[in-house]
Amino acid sequence: MNTGTAAPGSGISRRRLLVGGAGLAGAGAAGALAVASLAGGDAAAQATGGGVVPFHGVHQAGVVTRQDRLYFASFDVITDDPGELHRLLDDWTVAAAQMTAGLEAGEYGAVGGPYLAPPEDTGEALGLPAANLTITVGVGRSLFVDGDGRDRFGLAARLPSALIDLPHFPADDLDPARSGGDLCVQACADDPQVAFHAVRNLARIGFGVVSLRWSQLGFGRTSSTSTSQATPRNLFGFKDGTANIKAEEVEELDTHVWVQPGDDPGAEWLAGGSYLVARRINMHIETWDRTSLAEQETIVGRTKGSGAPLSGGDEFTEPDFAVTGRDDQTLIAERSHVRLAHPTVNGGARMLRRGYNFTDGSDGLGRLDAGLFFIAFVRDPRIQYVPMQTNLSRHDVMMEYLVHTGSALFAALPGVPDGGSFADALFD
Amino acid sequence: MNRSIPILVVAPLVLLAACTDNDTASGSDSIAVTSTDDACRLSTTEAPSGNLVFDVTNDGSEVTEFYLLAEDGLRIIGEVENIGPGLTRQLVVTAGPGTYVTACKPGMAGDGIRNEFTVTDSGSAVGPTGAAGDLLQSATEQYHEFVEHEAEDLLEKTEEFAALYTAGDDDGARAMYADARTHWERIEPVAESFGDLDPRLDLREADLAEGEAWTGWHRIEKDLWPPADGYTAATADERATLADQLVADTKELVERVEDLTFTPDQLGNGAKELLDEVATGKVTGEEEIWSHTDLWDFQANVDGARIAFEVLEPALRTKDDALAEELKTRFAELQALLDQYRDGDGFVLYTDLSADQVKELSDAVNALSEPLSRLTAAVVL
């Protein structure tokens, strides 16, 4: 059942009962508990062996978790009615809690509903485990104000000051059809079908209120976010994200990732949230593959095999940018990627990256349309992303093999507490 | 499917190697070299003639180098430099039977820690060690002449073009634009090696950072082929400034080129980079988005790559005749394809090409680029 078209009196959807609209705030708490207890059996059973990531919490899940598959979707809100937007976020909350618990979406799920009605859940995840599914929701600048600065849903006063329009970076070749958006959903899981199922069902619930603007399937997680995880490789074949902020670095997360109370007096609602930078970065992998190993390593600043910095040591040895070799040249080149992206040349700025490799088939010229779907979570993109990307886009030799084709910045909502809704932060 | 067999064979090796810091799959007959602050240990001091592979690991605390020297201890047969502490680098050299000297040089100072090394006769023919050296010397000299010549032609035509543009002769300037740029595109990797001049001369609008001043060829290109709306034409003063800057920067390029010296690997890599330029910029029509004269640049890039190949060809023939033949064939095939789009003194516009024709060109570029990427290692080895 699609709540967007549900007629009053057509039967009580559990979604409605559980969270309901603004008028049913009281029922919300009980409802979410019901979902939690419903999930309880499976969740407890799978928790020991992994499989279910708790949906509720101070922060949204899907930032420090380590799943290997991504389906990312950006939506335009097509209604003018704040009430409809509010209800959609409530409905998404219920469905997200269900699906992340490994349950089917909706009251009757995929096969338990009326025989003459289309199933509520689309069904392709039937029999699959929760696969550590996380669903992370963010809001774009364009949700608050339109291109002319007009308030769209009475939310303009809540626009976070760091939720900017990202500037044009040198060599950007952005496709508007792969950029921007009012809302985003980042679904991550160990199984691509589970992630796809999540986005598909949320998009379906949203018909009439939101419209899918662009989406991106990702595989092969780059940038480890846990010290227990080996650093994965990007499509250049190099380990990517060795120096990433890790889940275990709790203080670093507070310093660099989570928006803190008092950061933005005009948008206190975002405390506990984060900023999500998404960049679709195409790689010219064919020309890269024709580059000598020596040049590849010089460009990256690390060895391809072990990932050690060229200044020596092993993968986790801090790069030493001062060590020189022949002719007093530094072993790690001035314009190498590792140096230009390093916190020491970016005012100490760090970020939590969770990029995914992608391929969208081929480009019509006999080459793979492939690259890195870069995602980073930061506390303030104006400080932690924009200066670094400007530096990289201008100076990084690797840019010869990269072209940024999509871009978006979202404010990832704070976590949803038990009984809460994605809508709470925005509307309460 | 034929991939599954090597993977099965390699898998146990990878497992064994996983605990070391380097798991590249070097052959079992490679020679392990361990360089420490006060020792240079080799797993063997004798090997059969042919290709020798040294895996040099730096177990010391300083940056190290490794050399294979001729018996006299002076002539360098092969070297690997800048090995950071804890890292492993590979040196591959071709060596005939004889006595050699190995040297580790921790700290990169002095004569290094030396040992004698013997290459026995494996029975398979190996060209005289270092015989390609003279041919390579000649190659780099020829290439330098070519680059100088192109830079001078570039300056001459740039001055002519700039004068037409400043004088407001748009038709004249448009007619010269692609022809003048040909000389830039032929030596593009050399020009690009000047990190300050290249952005001033050849930056595309999309390459700019916000608020950055735009100068050079493509700025003028847009003014000569302006978009239908939303564009304000340059004033006479602006034209003069842009044209003067273009000429001044080109003059500086010519001066700097005179002082350059080239190494064989720069030639080989330069050829590869020229084809990369074709693959990422010209074959997609992104280089000349206003004039659509991408095929002129395409031809010029291919010319530059072919010259680099041709000057290296005598040396390559002594090392890998089959690669030389393949490259000759691929260059000819690509040229034949490009010739189909000649129009008068130049070419048809990029926008006149069909999607299928672009695909065909792209495939021919890939067919050439792949073997061309092996040129450097083949001649330098």
Image (cartoon, helix red, strand yellow):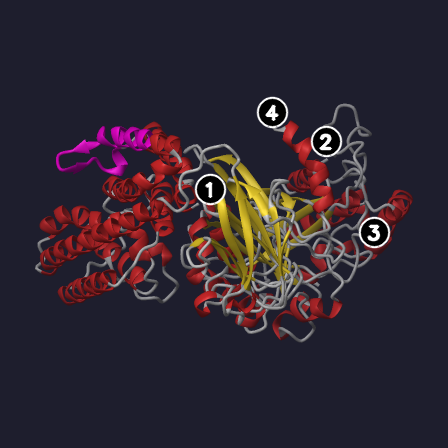
Measuring from the top left, give residue B338's x and y in whole percent: 25, 32
Measuring from the top left, give residue B155's x and y in whole percent: 16, 57
Magenta segment includes B239: no
What is the distance, in whole Å, between disc 3 and disc 1 at their CAs?
A: 78 Å
Measuring from the top left, give residue B105's x and y in whole percent: 54, 64
Residue underneath mark 2: A124
**What label sits on residue A145 in the rendered view?**
none
Magenta segment includes B334: yes
What is the magenta range?
Answer: B328-352
Q: Amino acid at mark 3?
A: Ala
Residue underneath mark 3: A32
Say which of marks 4 and 2 sits in front: 4
Q: Amino acid at mark 1?
A: Gly
Q: Amino acid at mark 2?
A: Glu
Q: Does the residue at mark 4 contact the one at mark 2 (Cβ under 8 Å)?
A: no
Say which of marks 4 and 3 sits in front: 4
Closer-to-camera residue (A151/A205)? A205
What is the distance, in whole Å, between disc 4 and disc 3 at their CAs?
A: 54 Å
Labels 1, 2: one chain: no
Q: Residues within 10 Å of mark 3 (few under 14, many from 20)?
A: many
Residue underneath mark 1: B96
Name the image quarter holding residue B293.
top left
Number of marks present in the image shown: 4
Measuring from the top left, give residue A338's x and y in whole percent: 54, 61
SS type, badge 3? helix
Say which of marks 2 and 3 sits in front: 2
Name the image quarter holding residue A170.
bottom left
Taking the spot 76% from the left edge, 58% from the top edge, the residue there is: A416
Residue underneath mark 4: B2
What is the distance, in whole Å, between disc 1 and disc 2 at their CAs?
A: 64 Å
Q: Residues within 10 Å of mark 4 (few under 14, many from 20)?
A: few
Closer-to-camera residue (A154/B229)? B229
